[in-house]
Amino acid sequence: MMYEVDELLEAKRQIDSTLHKIREVVKTYEAKENPERYKSQLTLAKRRLKAFEIANQLIEDKLSELENDHGGH
């Protein structure tokens, strides 16, 4: 499926926002007095963080690819 550049940029903007929120959640859980108590939530947040980082990188790769395609014409 092909996406327009503006769709990819908006998706990246949304993912960046979500990444920021998840990073804050991770910091909050790690700062708790007894972080072991929140181990499952922390694991889930870290897994989500990794998944969104991968998605973000794939979008960046696609944007670079599109930029190179259009820049070569």
Image (cartoon, rainbow, N blue to C red):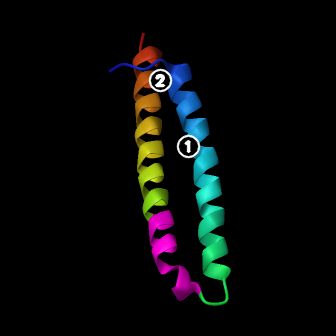
Vertical order, 40 against 69 (above or below)? below
Q: Secondary structure at mark 1?
A: helix
Q: Residue drawn at (64%, 72%), measured in percent from left and top?
A: 27
Within the image, what quadrant is residue 50 found in?
bottom left
Q: Which residues are magenta?
A: 35-46
Q: Amino acid at mark 1?
A: Ile
Q: Residue drawn at (67%, 81%), measured in percent from left and top?
A: 31
Q: How far apart in space, not on screen, are marks 2 and 1 (Cα)?
A: 20 Å
In the rendered image, residue 39, in percent from the top left (x then y), is placed at 48, 80
Q: Secondary structure at mark 2?
A: helix
Q: Magenta span: helix, strand or loop, mainly?
A: helix
Categorize mark 2 by other alpha carbons within 10 Å: few (<14), some (14-19), many (20+).
few
Q: Earlier in the sequence, mark 2 or mark 1?
A: 1
Residue 31 left/right relative to 15: right
In the rendered image, residue 45, in percent from the top left (x then y), is placed at 50, 64
Q: Nearer the viewer, residue 54 or 68?
A: 54
In the rendered image, residue 11, in percent from the top left (x then y), is placed at 53, 33
Q: Amino acid at mark 2?
A: Glu
Q: Quadrant of the C terminus?
A: top left
Residue located beneath label 2 in the image: 67
Residue located beneath label 1 in the image: 15
Find out whether residue 40 is within the magenta segment: yes
Within the image, what quadrant is residue 10 found in?
top right
Vertical order, 16 against 47 (above or below)? above
Vertical order, 44 against 4 (above or below)? below
